Structure formats: structure tokens, C-alpha cells
Image: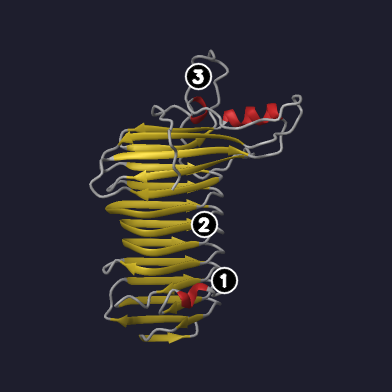
Amino acid sequence: MMTTPNPTRCPVGQGLSRCAAPAAALFLAGSQMALAQPLTERVEHAVEIPRNARVSIMNFAGHVEVHGTDPGEDSTLRVIGVKRLEAELPAEEAERIFEAVNLDLRRRGRRIHIGPNRPRPDRNRASGDRRESPPVTEVRPPRRIPPVSVDLEVWLPDGASLEVRTFTAPITVAGIGAPDGDFLLRSVSGPIEIRDLEADDLRAETVSGNVTLADVRAHRGSFMTLTAPIRVTGALQPDGWYEFQTHSGAVLLGLGSLAGFTVAATTYSGEIRSELEFEAERDSRSLEGRHGSGGPQISVSTFGGSIHLAPEAAAVRDVER
């Protein structure tokens, strides 16, 4: 976790560059000199949210880490953000780009929007009367992404739902208990890691980022990648239903610690391997049956990726994609 001795608190809706003071040094020997040290700013938001709130996070570069709060804590959503620019640019241009990217937290009813945006003033309005840009809610990379990264760390109260969308930013979600909540995690090329999560509905989707699951207790789970592997270990919800899909990525299931589960696995041109005992019907491209006493239902499908069921997490650690 990131810590700070004197965090800066900003009113809801106020951007990062307008609240926290920059903590960076510039080597200025003329307007055309390159940036000597990174520009950085740090901000903290804190806001009370209802138990049925839905928190939406958008980020392009940097990372997103979401943690649960301790049981019994109040319903305060806390956000720490660090904005950083490290590109080799003339100092004046670097400052201009850096100031143009703001980290905002906005509340609309029970929805909370968090993430960097680039407010664009309305040229037909006076400078003091600018229309606020709408929050970003979809992964739509601009034609030119500014060289500014934002590291976000969020503490999510129990019961809230979560939506995270990133472009290259990794997503980590850990230690959250939301048995009635739904979670949607999407990234283009950033990896997604989920640990110790209880939820009603959970979806994680990437194009080329790995998906790693450990002790995920969701009643319904859907996990998709195009070229990257999906790795699963630890506990699952006993009455849960889980679906894993890839095109060319491997699906690695280290579920031997479970008392049992039911699986239906198919691949078009990949390989299915199992180190577990099954009451199953199988051939070279499909496996359907039950391990142990039953339990969660698991569906796996790939086009060219391999499927591997193993008794321990170590058994799938070094399996190639």
C-alpha cells in the first residue's frame, strides 16, 4: 500500500492538478530544455457512499489497485492517486501536458466515477464559465495518449459494486467481501489479478493481459482473454458457476484442493491435460465430468489454447502459453 504522512484531501469533483502541489524539480536552462526529473503530484479523495453504490474507475497508464476495507469500518470510499510524467520533453511542453491531465472523483446518485480526464474548455464560453467534461466510462483510447501515468489505489467499502476499465494499466482487486455486488474488470493489454474476492457476479476480460485468480468466491464468474493465459488457484464458491474462454491463451486450473467440481472443457486445436481423477467422458479435444463430490460448475473453451487441470498451484506455474 502507498502511505503518506500528510495526505492532501480534495473536495469531490476537484481535479488533481488543481489541488495537490507538484513534488518535482525541473532543470530549466531555457524553454527548449528537456525535463530533468519526473513531474509528480499526489492527491487523496474520501467520500461517504451508500452500501449499494457502484464505483467506476477508468485509467489508461499506471496501475489500479482496489482493496477491501476492514469489517466494521464506515462506508468511506478512499482514493489515493499519483500522477507522473517522465517523458523527454521541453520543460514548458511537459508542464502544459501535465497540467492538462486531472484526476477527478465525481458522484452522480449512487454512481461514483474515478479517473484521469482531460477537460476541454468551451471556446464559446468565458474562461471562468467552462463546461465540465463528462466522466470516462468506456475504454476508448484517444488518438494520442499523453505521456502521463496515474497510479490509483482505492479502498472499497463492503457491499459496493465495482467497474474498472483500463488500456495498458494493470488491475489488482484483493480482499473484498461483496456477496451481493457485481464486478466488471476490463483491460486491453494490462494484466488482471483477483485475490480473495467474494461477489455475486464477476467478469474479467482482456485482449493480451494475463488473468490470475486466487480464492475467488463468486456465484457467477466469466473470464475471457484473446491471447493471454488464465490461471486459477484456491477456493471457489461451492455453488458457483464459472466460465473461462480464450482464443490462443492457455487455461490453467490448479483446483486439486477443492473437495470437488464439475467441468466441461473443449478446445478446437489445443490440448487438454488432467492430473486429477475424473468420472468423465473425454477425447483429445473435450472432457466432461465430475471430480470428487461435485461442487462448482466450470466451463472452459479455447480455440488453440491448451487446458490443464492440476492438483496444486505449482503444477501449473511453469506451463507455457
Q: Which residue is mark 2?
A: 191
Which mark's residue is nearer the viewer, 3 or 2?
A: 2
Query: Considering depth in this image, is 129 or 84 the residue closer to the camera?
Result: 84
Q: CA distance from mark 1 to mark 2?
A: 15 Å
- Assign the C terminus to one quadrant of the image: bottom right
Whether residue 191 is situated above or below residue 117 in the rendered picture: below
Which mark's residue is nearer the viewer, 1 or 3?
A: 1
Mark with earlier residue (1, 2): 2
Q: In the image, residue 249 lies at what x, y percent?
A: 54, 68
Whether residue 66 is situated above or below residue 46 in the rendered picture: below
Q: Which residue is mark 3?
A: 130
Amino acid identity at mark 1: Arg
Whether residue 108 is visible, yes or no, is yes
Give the SS element for disc 3. Answer: loop
Amino acid identity at mark 2: Pro
Residue located at (26% from left, 68% from top): 239
Q: Which residue is mark 1?
A: 321
Give the SS element for disc 2. Answer: loop
Query: Considering depth in this image, is 60 or 86 the residue closer to the camera?
Result: 86
Give the SS element for disc 1. Answer: loop
Amino acid identity at mark 3: Arg
Whether residue 267 is visible, yes or no, is no
Mark with earlier residue (3, 2): 3
**Side of 37 where 132 appears, left or right:** left
Residue located at (33% from left, 81% from top): 291
Quadrant position of residue 4? top left
Whether residue 261 is situated above or below residue 210 in the rendered picture: below
Whether residue 201 is situated above or below residue 137 in the rendered picture: below
The residue carrying pointer 2 sits among few (fewer than 14), some (14 to 19) or many (20 or more) residues within 10 Å by Cα, namely many
